[in-house]
Image: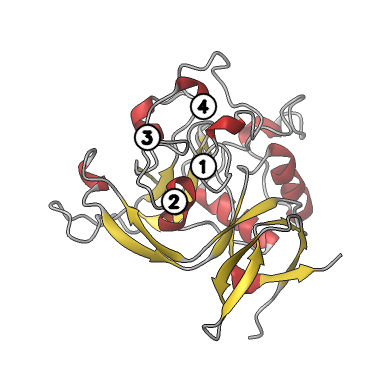
Amino acid sequence: MRRRIFICFLLAAAFGKGTDAAGQAQSYPRTIRWLKDGAEMIFIPAGEFPMGSNQFEPNEKPAHKVLVKDYYIDKYELTNDKYFRFCRETGRPLPMHMRELQAVPAGRGNHPVNHVSFYDGEAYCQWAGKRLPTEEEWEKAARDADSRTYPWGSGWDQHLSNNRTSPAEDTLPVGSIPRGASPYGLMDMAGNVWEWTNSWFKSYPGAERQFDETGKNKVVRGGAYFYSIELLRTTYRHPLPPDDRSEYGGFRCAVDTDQVKLNPK
């Protein structure tokens, strides 16, 4: 079957190095606008990074090097407005908080969508011509290669994420706390809503306690607005059944670079 190529708009002049299908170096723009849903996406270059941690929870151990291919990932968590459009165009049932009005609640269009399962996130990404990120891709985008504990650095600062100490006690519009961005410029990688990944919850290679919850629990990352600082760390892994639709869960999309065709306009 012929591979579909999805067109996006070039947003930034800065370019990063990637590798094409033939193994040759190729330059990609740092930021693109995905044509299907209008999402801003950020380029994450291929390379090795230290995943996990030897300091915290057993399921985060051991720290180990992982090689990730280059990809793009949404700068922001997916919003209510974008998900509502998807539901209207495809006939997929609306999330719980939109059903009564059959609309996005007033003032919440730019808040991250929640009450969505892994399957809802997967369906949206497929509709948009993208996919959910793996947890390896998610963690690299959140911390890069310097083993930082939080997207902004190693030290905790309650003002750099939407967490349980935040006065809103609710989701915030995506990108509301730009000082808490990850090294690549991604927003809300700590707090606001948990983010589904495409990975099953398994122990890392070489872990003292081996487990495999394939078919039972997916990995969500990043913590949420009502969660404590321990759960907002870049290495924290949380298992959830893929049909869970809590008020704390959302997602963002990713795409392989070989799926990208730039529109020079």
Q: Where is residue 194 drawn, in percent x and y?
A: 48, 38
Residue at which label 2 appears:
144
Residue position for label 4: 160
* Disc 2 packing (10 Å; few <14; some 14–19; many ≥20): many
As drawn, the residue found furthest toward the top would be 167
- Mark nearer the N terminus (2 vs 4): 2
Measure the alpha-carbon separation of dots 2 and 4: 18 Å
Q: Earlier in the sequence, mark 3 or mark 4?
A: 3
Q: Amino acid at mark 1?
A: Ser
- Going from N to C along the chain, the mark reached first, 1 or 3, is 3
Give coordinates of residue 143: x percent, y percent.
Answer: 43, 46
Q: Are marks 2 and 1 in contact (CB under 8 Å)?
A: yes
- Look at the image and tell me in which quarter the C terminus lies: bottom right
Residue 182: numbered disc:
1
Residue that badge 3 annotates: 154
What SS does tag 3 mark?
loop
